[in-house]
Image: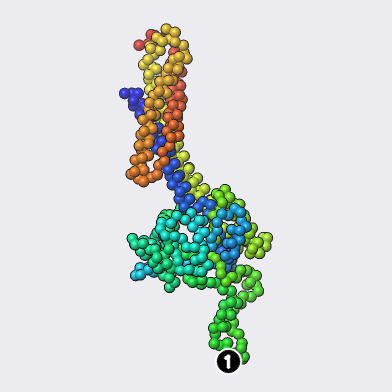
Amino acid sequence: MRSVLTCLGITIGVAAVIAVVEIGQGTAQAVEQTIATLGANFLQVEAGAYSSAGVSMGAGTAVTLTPQDCEAIVRECSAVRRAAPGVDCRMQVIHGNRNYVPWKVLGTSPDYLEVRDWTDLEEGEPFTDHDVSSAAGVCLMGQTPLRELFGDDSPLGKQVFVRGVPLRVVGVLRRKGANMMGQDQDDLILAPWTTVKLRINGSKLSLSELNAIANAASPLSQVNTLGRLYPGQQTQVYPQRSPLQAADNPQLMRQVDLDDIYMSATSLEAVPEAIDQITRLLRERHRIRAGQPDDFGIRNMIEMSKAVASTGKRLTDLLLYLALISLAVGGVGIMNMMLVSVNERTHEIGLRMAVGARPRDIHRQFLAEAVTLCLLGGAPGVLLGRGASAAVTALLGWPAVPSLAAALGAVAVSAAVGVVFGYYPARKASRLDPIVALRHE
């Protein structure tokens, strides 16, 4: 009974080690899958910030990115696998008597599904490059707006209205869930970027183009008034920027611009090279001189994914160390029991020495007993640890991955504990004087 109770400490320690390792590996795998849904090699180029009177309006407010930039990135950056333009808005979406405002109505190209690893649709099919070139009224529905607008009905072939523009649903995106920052990735609608840009948002025009449109539409350009000396005089509706303002806030003026460019690198290791290539290319295309700041920003998931993975690994290591402490406590129990056993079996030790046993034979005997006790405690500990991780998965929903390496490692550690904590009692037994041991009662 004393041996069984002593082995129980080793059993609990081994079970704790196995359960912690399996749950830790399952959690790490779940984190990796979450990062994979975002795309660890995912890159996003966003337009720069426009500033007025020394006040920055924030990233994305300047007109700096164009569709030609996106095409040039795919063509000239070897570390970039795919690239897709992005034009987004947040507007009310209407279907029948229901309405909903998704997190984003994103205008992009079919390559966006490749960039985000979203090619496997739940139903339907993606829009095509022809839909992009013709600014077709089609869209892909995310799971959240699907639930809010259609409930349990299939949306395929039905229309939704965004700012009065009809969009026919041609496909449904599969569920991705929340990202690492808690943002619902399914709360969006995808449409051709030309549709969002030209039919829903409207294009950004330069000041000269706005003035030309205003003059063409204004009847005052053809009627003489007290304030106008000549009938053909042009009206300056939108004042031009002064040379000083133009120098302080240089902007690229395009009739069609992009809010973002979404890309995926050829591999996770190629992300830094892709960032360097994109930076050099866009600075050259935007004619940014050396020493001047970029008029764009590049975001990537590397640092965030590394931080999350590192945090998870540290927590798993911490729990593993705590489990190893319980093994050490069990080893102390083994050592105490073996010391008691040496004192109780002193006469037996003296008798063995009297008939020819050498000190190393006694040492091996007690060391083997200590290791055997630890192994006998480790075997049921493997089953208990596997059962504990399965119970945690079933009751709490925490992921756990069965690990043969953890089981073998825990048994090996328990044997090592037997060697370490059984050495002193075995050495003490081997150094007894045979005559004194025979006289012991």
How did the renderer colour the structure?
rainbow
Q: Nearer the viewer, residue 315 or 135?
A: 135
| Rendering coords of residue 199 (x, y %) | 49, 71
**Residue at the far left in the pictured view:** 1
| Rendering coords of residue 145 (x, y %) | 39, 62
Which quadrant holds residue 49?
A: bottom right
Q: How many labels does the image show?
A: 1
Label 1: state its secondary structure: loop
Name which residue type carries label 1.
Asn
Q: Which of 53 and 391 is in front in this view?
A: 391
> Can residue 125 be spotted in the picture?
yes
Which quadrant holds residue 250?
A: bottom right
Q: Which residue is drawn at 50% across and 49% down?
A: 305
Q: Residue at x 36, y 33 (%)?
A: 383
Q: Is residue 218 placed above or below 361 in the rendered structure?
A: below
- In the shown orientation, is residue 63 left or right of residue 165? right
Q: Which of 431 and 173 is in front in this view?
A: 173
Q: Which residue is drawn at 45% across and 66% down?
A: 138
Q: Which residue is drawn at 59% across and 58% down?
A: 74
| Rendering coords of residue 124 (x, y %) | 42, 60
**Residue at the far front in the pictured view:** 130
The residue wearing badge 1 is 224
Quadrant for the C terminus in the image = top left
